[in-house]
Image: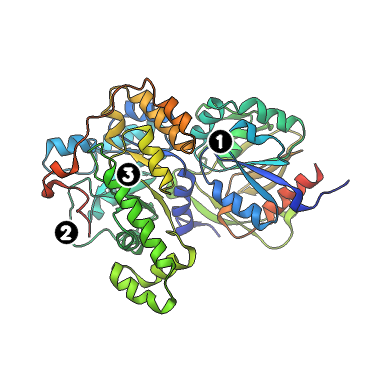
């Protein structure tokens, strides 16, 4: 498998709403180019896409309003890696168990929104993520979702009390937590690895 | 080990609201309209600031029945206002499970010397500020998010602009100082030394800063985003206009695409008349809300 040097890669961050800046900072620290995506034409030429945390209902509405649904589906089908954090996970999932909203239906997972409760139940915890190597990863969970059910092709990479909070299906990666709010670049590096191999 | 309500988790929720619009609502019906329009959160209160201004009397925390109804109606975060210094109201809001408390000058202050010790709470707080010193005093008390005060209930953006520009100018000033000038700066700003040093180091506030107080149109929202705020609160501006759902949607889109003037113009069409608005100089000084808070 051929891989490309990091500096030749451009990873887009969907910038309709949410924690965009933090992902861009992480990507730049990892040595790749980052591009804010506000309109569909900016998807042209990206090697990977991050759908950030934010309010999933808001981002979902803006994705529909600005015609992102089909272009993002085409990117996913063409094998471009896509990584969703928190709200991004909800949008990438196939169905949600609570509350209706427009979804991209990319990944074979069922998602429970706000699964841990309201903000006062938000928390940090050490996660064991075998794939990453090194010590535990600080998982920052903010009104976070959980993955309720996973399809056969989905590889669960981390869990909290037996419930999946990080998973991969081919070129799709999701986390219910926010690595972009930490200084730990291992998950972003892992995603960049997926992009290099795509 | 699980740690709840850390500083990172409290500030983190505000990070997730960036680029979005938080709307004042007084009923669950309004909350639904706000959510459908794409609000990132709603602020539950008894009356919108324009009505508080008109009604006079003491403005307090909203009725818990109404707050609960709003929480049961929408899935986006629900914020609610407590009076300045009224930690018992804030405790009640926390016990109900609201997602953020706004210790707000829009309500009648309960303490004319002290703000709430916000470190004591699991629920995060947002507080208003007119300048950097005020913002840093609130952070020193444990606030996890800042907003400009503006002049609530006026539909006049001039004070929000003044406060955003003041905070920007003072951050720039602090960034230029030498380390041996920081204590004098802290004295001048009446702000904790450590936080002044942090502002110098990162060249910004260490928390998310939204605009609030007088935003009434999509262009107002765009203007505030250009001034570097992370998002906007709209209080009376939506539900005191003649077509709240259309105006709410337009303000959401203008906030996302504030750098696109064509889009701001387009979304501003056909959304009816904005709230009437008040000229600040015609408000008697004792009726200004922004001077509340210490």
Q: Is residue A80 left or right of residue A110?
A: right
Please name the residue shown 62% across and 31% down the image.
A40
Per the image, label 2 sits on a secondary structure element best described as loop
Please name the residue shown 65% across and 52% down the image.
A27
Which chain letter goes with mark 2? B
Q: Which mark is residue A112?
A: 1
- Confirm whether residue B22 shows in the render: no
The foreground one among A29 and A59 is A29
- Confirm whether residue B221 shows in the render: yes
Per the image, label 1 sits on a secondary structure element best described as strand
Marks 1/2: CA–CA distance: 44 Å
The foreground one among B99 and B250 is B250
Per the image, label 3 sits on a secondary structure element best described as loop
- Asked if the residue under mark 2 is in contact with the one under mark 1, i.e. CB atoms within 8 Å, the reply is no
Q: Residues within 10 Å of mark 3 (few under 14, many from 20)?
A: many
User: Badge 3 is on which residue?
Assistant: B212
Res B77 → quadrant: top left
Q: Is residue B252 left or right of residue B284?
A: right
Which chain letter goes with mark 3? B
Which of the two marks, 1 or 2, is nearer to us in this view? 2
Q: Which mark is residue B112?
A: 2
Position in image of residue B21 (x %, y %): 40, 38
Q: Is residue A36 left or right of residue A156?
A: left
Please name the residue shown 34% across and 72% down the image.
B185
Marks 1/3: CA–CA distance: 33 Å
* Residue located farthest toward the bottom when viewing the structure as drawn: B180
């Amino acid at each position: 498998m051929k891989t490309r040097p990091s500096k030749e890669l451009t990873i887009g961050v969907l910038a309709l709403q949410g924690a965009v800046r933090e992902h861009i900072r992480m990507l730049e620290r990892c040595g790749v180019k980052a591009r804010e995506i506000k309109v569909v034409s900016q998807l042209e030429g990206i090697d990977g896409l991050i759908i950030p945390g934010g309010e999933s209902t808001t981002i979902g509405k803006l994705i529909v309003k600005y015609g992102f649904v089909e272009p993002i589906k085409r990117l996913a089908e063409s094998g471009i890696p896509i990584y969703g954090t928190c709200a991004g996970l909800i949008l990438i999932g196939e169905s949600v168990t609570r509350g209706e909203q427009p979804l991209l239906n990319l990944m074979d997972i069922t998602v429970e929104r706000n699964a841990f409760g309201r903000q006062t139940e938000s928390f940090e915890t050490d996660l064991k993520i075998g794939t990453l190597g090194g010590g535990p990863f600080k998982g920052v969970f903010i009104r976070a979702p959980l993955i309720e059910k996973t399809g056969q092709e989905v590889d669960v990479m981390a869990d909290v009390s037996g419930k999946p909070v990080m998973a991969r299906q081919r070129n799709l990666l999701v986390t219910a937590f926010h690595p972009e709010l930490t200084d730990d670049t291992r998950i972003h590096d892992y995603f960049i690895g997926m992009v290099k191999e795509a | 080990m699980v740690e709840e309500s850390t500083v990172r988790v409290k500030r983190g929720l505000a990070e997730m609201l960036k680029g979005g619009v938080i709307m004042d609502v007084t009923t669950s019906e309004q909350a639904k309209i706000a959510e459908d329009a794409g609000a990132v959160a709603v602020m539950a209160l008894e009356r919108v600031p324009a009505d508080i201004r008109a009604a006079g009397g003491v403005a307090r925390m909203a009725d818990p029945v109404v707050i609960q109804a709003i929480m049961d109606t929408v899935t986006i975060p629900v914020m609610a206002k407590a009076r300045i210094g009224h930690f018992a109201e804030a405790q009640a809001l926390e016990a109900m499970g609201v997602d953020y408390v706004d210790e707000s000058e829009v309500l009648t202050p309960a303490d004319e010397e002290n703000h709430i010790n916000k470190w004591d709470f699991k629920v995060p707080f947002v507080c208003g500020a007119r300048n950097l010193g005020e913002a840093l005093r609130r952070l020193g008390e444990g606030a996890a998010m800042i907003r400009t005060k503006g002049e609530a209930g006026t539909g006049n953006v001039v004070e929000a602009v003044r406060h955003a520009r003041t905070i920007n100018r003072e951050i720039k000033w602090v960034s230029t100082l030498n380390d041996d000038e920081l204590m004098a700066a802290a004295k001048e700003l009446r702000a904790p030394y450590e936080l002044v040093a942090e502002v110098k180091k990162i060249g910004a506030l260490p928390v998310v800063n939204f605009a609030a107080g007088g935003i009434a149109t999509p262009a107002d929202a765009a203007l505030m985003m250009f001034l570097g705020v992370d998002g906007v609160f709209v209080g009376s501006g939506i539900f005191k206009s003649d077509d709240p759902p259309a105006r709410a949607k337009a303000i959401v889109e203008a906030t996302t695409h504030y750098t696109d003037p064509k889009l701001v113009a387009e979304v501003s069409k056909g959304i009816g008349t904005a709230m009437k608005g008040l000229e600040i100089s015609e408000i008697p000084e004792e009726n200004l809300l922004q001077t509340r808070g210490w």
